Amino acid sequence: MPSIVRAALIQATLCEPVTSPLAKIKQAMIDKHVALIERAVGKGAQVVCLQELFYGPYFPATQDPRWYDLAEKAPGGPTVRLMQELAQRHKVVLVVPLMEEELSGLYYNTAAVLDADGTFLGKFRKMHLPHVAPGFWEKFYFRPGNLGYPVFSTAAGKIGVYLCYDRHFPEGARCLGLNGAEIVFNPSATVAGLSEYLWKLEQPAHAVANGYFVGAINRPGYEEPWRIGEFYGQSYFCDPRGQIIAEGSRSTDDIVIADLDLEQIREVRKTWQFFRDRRPETYGKIAEL
């Protein structure tokens, strides 16, 4: 296992109008991301994470059954199979967020984790679902996650995933740390008027509290005709001290790359013994209330 891992985040604007046929939207976004993954690999990336619901718009901006048809199996669906082929070909770990269909009419907001040999290691299902204005109607589409907070041993280290709205809940971020995560990816779709003031507060705080690296992704630009706000990009990596070490643009496609020295985790945890000094026997009210 390398001490220094080169990691990449991909943020990308929508490249087809939302009124286009779903198959056309999906294929265009997949093609775009395949090219961006290949560019990231060309820059030496060993692990690449894509944005939330990467192969379409952020469709929970509206409540429309039309978008159910974007769902597919994970594993077994065509997008995951394609990404497994890419992972194997390029020897890169991939984190692939998509709309998962468990069975007909039952969907999850999911991220698949694929190892550098193409192996499907598992998935994280978004645990906390927003259902708030303006335009975050995820409970219309998804069931809350039921797989807990898994951490995956990959060729690029021990990886955990937290999805968008999950980041507002420190309990799951702590679970990922206790489960051994070295890098936590948080693919997101969030807009300026709602959350930008929190964007660089919460996730560096998770990194500090748990002594791991965080890769935070947000898609860029406006998505018409919903225009619920500006997806403000600014994807970034922060280290276990909460320092932002690489950051993307606000409004354009971007590949954010950082070299993550996993030895820094041990160094920081020797200084800040947060896991040693926890008092879980005193925290019962958290689960009771």
Image (cartoon, grey):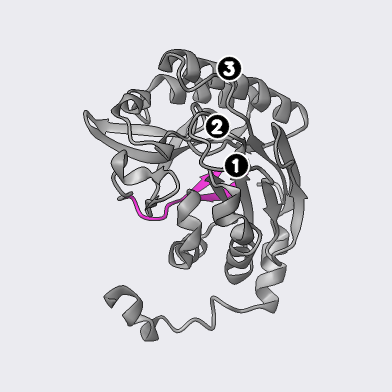
Q: Are marks 1 and 2 in contact (CB under 8 Å)?
A: yes
Binning the other alpha carbons within 10 Å of mark 1 as few (below 14), some (14 to 19) or many (20 upward) gives many
In the image, is residue 24 above or below residue 39? Answer: above
Q: Is residue 51 left or right of residue 258?
A: left
Q: Which numbered disc, 3 or 1, marks the residue that appears first in the sequence? A: 3
- Upstream in the sequence, badge 2 or badge 3? 3
Q: Is residue 162 visible?
A: no
Which residue, given by chain and number where applicable, does mark 2 sit on? 223
Q: Which amino acid type is marked by label 1?
A: Phe
Where does the magenta region start and end?
147-161
- Marked residue nearer the N-terminal end (1 or 2): 2
The circle drawn on residue 231 is 1
Q: Is residue 154 magenta?
A: yes
- Residue nearest the viewer, comparing 75 with 107: 107
Mark 3 — residue?
A: 31
Instruction: Name the residue type under label 2.
Output: Glu
Mark 2 neighbour density, 10 Å: few (under 14) some (14–19) many (20 or more): many
Q: Is residue 63 left or right of residue 225?
A: left
